[in-house]
Image (cartoon, grey):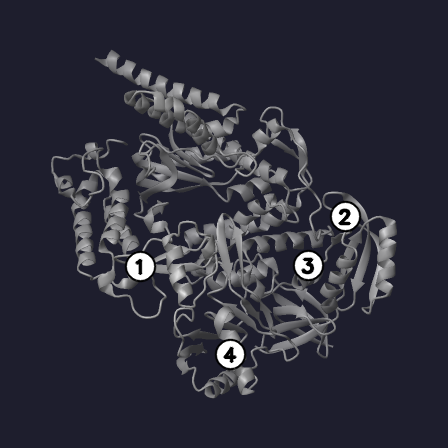
Amino acid sequence: MSELTGWLLDVYAGETGLTVWLLDDEGSRHCLSQAFSTAFYVAGNSSHLRAVWRWFSSQPEPVCLSRTERHDLFVGPTTVLAVECKHPVGLPRLFQRLSRAFPSLAYYDADIPLSLRYTAAFGVFPLGRVRAEMQGNSICSIAPLSSPWDLDPAWPPVRTLSLEPDCDPSHAEPKGLFLSYDGHRYHQPLNPHRALLVNLRSILERHDPDLLLTAWGDTWLLPYLLKLSTQAGLPLPLNRDPAGRITRKDQRTYYAYGQVVYRGAQVLLSGRWHVDVCNAVMYHDYGLEGVLELARITSLPVQTAARVSPGTGISSMQILTALRRGVLVPYHKQQAEGPKTILDLLHSDMGGLVYQPTVGLHTDVAEVDFVSMYPSVMSHFNISPETIVPGRRQPETGLPVTRPERGLVPETLEPLLQKRLALKSALLTLPKWDPRRKRYLAWAAAYKWLLVTCFGYLGYKNARFGRIEAHEAVTAYGREALLRAKEAAEDLGGDVLHLYVDGMWVKKPGWRTPGDFQPLLDSILERTGLPIALDGVYRWVAFLPSRVDKRVPVANRYFGVFKNGEIKARGIELRRRDTPAFIRETQQAILEILAKALDANCIPAVLPEAQALIRRRLVDLRSGQIPLEKLIVRQTLSRELDRYRSPSPAAIAARQLAEAGKHLRPGQSVRFVYTLGKPGIRAWDLAGETDPRTVNIKEYRKLLLRAVETVLSPFRENGFLQEGIPIMLPSMQKTSRTASCLLSTA
Amino acid sequence: MGRTLPTISHQFSEAEASFSRFRRALRRSDQVALDDLFASARQHLAAAAYAAHVLPFETFLLSMLLEEHKELIRLRQRVEKQ
């Protein structure tokens, strides 16, 4: 018997039991095995269950059958048939055959990722510290030495090998790879293939990386290398586990949150992680730090955590809570929405409160936000699919009624909410140079996504622990909280400019500093019980009207500058992904100039600088000084090409690519430049260079002026300038113009 | 929300559209005034959504009346000041 302390790297099904990878304190990697039986459950009437029992005796896999009572979240104690498999590797296939033979029965715990079962059984989790006792190469017992909720966990010294082709393979044929590991970085040509394979192989063996961090590894690089290796007859040890397999998954396109999303194919390794930064979900948002933290808290293997949506992450955490509590995890959700009257539907089928802001420029405005409002509501009011009492409402408020027992969803959320709050408050005090800052920011971003999707999953019809009544209850409490916040502000004499789901914009004459708004925050906390924070006090903020009808305000189109000089903008060009860099940068630069004014009264002093900038940028555009890359428009394809009735610019560009043999799928983005003549579009990724002389200057001038108009319009009176020609601004320099007339709408 | 029941903005657009024949037959100057009324009602869509009234158009009418009354107060104050 020997003992080992270190980190858990990975767990997956081995030939007989589990394969467990540990990294010990001395830095050695251990590939160990562990016996681990897994169970799933079948429910149905007794004659059906007897038939299932008989069916199992004719199957080759050895299973242990028993009748037992388990807890169904919605039904309560339920008698089920427990099917225990000695070898976890065989369970998926066995279950597939069973469910095909008996499609009408209810199944539980049938498709739970092995790593979740492992965490539920032993409390250890990916990248967590563990102590294991072993007999030879086999683990007898394993126990956690840390918690996934630690703020400063000891990190395993993971070795990384980065591989990146020298250009985007969907754009052009790469000529070589950039390799970096252990402080080395060099370029390795793809040709001759043999040299490439031999060199890669020697690095893999010598450096023995735990993590293969690639660009386009899923969609191009790894499939390419594997093909070369087969052709040349030179094995490439991408897997570290010689008995392991390389798992490949196909590309797919799906629709989520009102967007068509494209996910590339996947290549997963055994005994070594492969993370493709181009195919990892939200990588641009939280990076590798976020991915590793997700693996820790969701208990999904690192490779999976990198590739799944936050929705899968949060439902994994709910499954983990269910496993710990001994609650059955349904394979398919059984519950349908209960019947309700049309009046009930009218009152419950509502989203968050979204007001129309008071359009125009406002000074000394505070923005207060509920912190993670919907998850906090779930946690504070104990909203979970099983705690909602259907059809019952509190008599005085009309709010839904919940049972007192702690719900599964709030229990899952609580540590998440607490850690996010801890991260946020740590970030407030950490100095700028502290290395933890970057990590905490990435984690907070990852947590934010988990928390956001948790609410959506509560109402998602296929979510295992979803229930529409619970989803509706969350929005009902959310609306109530926001209205109470509004009443608190008005009772203190404040003027509410805007309300948006979980945020409120308030001003009151005389209130200028964060301290002035503290009584308001206290009052809101007291009235709602929910955590509330001051996002900041704006020197000025402008709420913009609709572009189509100036009389109509738009809920989420505004920009402003906080007292500390920080710019916040929503819904304007610089926030849109399809805005060319040239226009985005110009708009940002104008805002930065405006932010130099210490308060709104000083804006006239900085306007000439903004005008000069705009004039310079227009001259640059006309004289061809703007690099073509900065004129690229990027748009996402929303459907198959033959489904476009009147082709959008993106569809025209995609068609040009299709004619050149490059096929894009819905959800993939296409890059193009506006050009002169017909069709007025040239796909950026076509072979050959775009001729700078063909660029449609007029079109870009129009886009630029529109973006300028957006940010300057709040600073002039109506009719002061002609529509659409903000460059004719010189009259704004008039010294007679006083700040008061600039702020006429405030 | 917005899947089973139409959103408040959608109901509002429908209400506005249902009066397109009425609007068309009005004099141009009256059309402008009618558009103003609808634009003023639009400012209270959030409250109309929260009210979840069975007949949303009643809420829209009340919103128009509200804005008219605000204008009346504003004008009265100006007159009294002079």
Q: Earlier in the sequence, mark 4 or mark 3?
A: 3
Seen as rendered, the residue at the extreme left is A735
Label 2, on which residue?
A71
Q: Which of the two marks, 3 or 2, is nearer to us in this view?
A: 3
Label 4, on which residue?
A225
The circle drawn on residue A673 is 1
Q: Earlier in the sequence, mark 4 or mark 2?
A: 2
Residues flagged by tags 4 and 2 on a common chain: yes
At 27% from the left edge and 46% from the top edge, which residue is drawn? A706
* Residue nearest the viewer, comparing A701 with A195: A701
The circle drawn on residue A490 is none
Q: Earlier in the sequence, mark 4 or mark 1?
A: 4
Q: Amino acid at mark 4?
A: Leu
* Residue nearest the viewer, comparing A337 with A437: A337
Residues flagged by tags 3 and 1 on a common chain: yes
Q: Secondary structure at mark 1?
A: strand
Q: CA distance from mark 3 to mark 1?
A: 47 Å
User: Is disc 4 in contact with disc 3, using a CB cutoff of under 8 Å?
Assistant: no
Label 3, on which residue?
A112
Q: State which quadrant residue A153 falls in.
A: bottom right
Q: CA distance from mark 1 to mark 2?
A: 59 Å
User: Is disc 3 in contact with disc 2, using a CB cutoff of under 8 Å?
Assistant: no
At 13% from the left edge and 39% from the top edge, which residue is drawn? A731
Q: Earlier in the sequence, mark 3 or mark 2?
A: 2
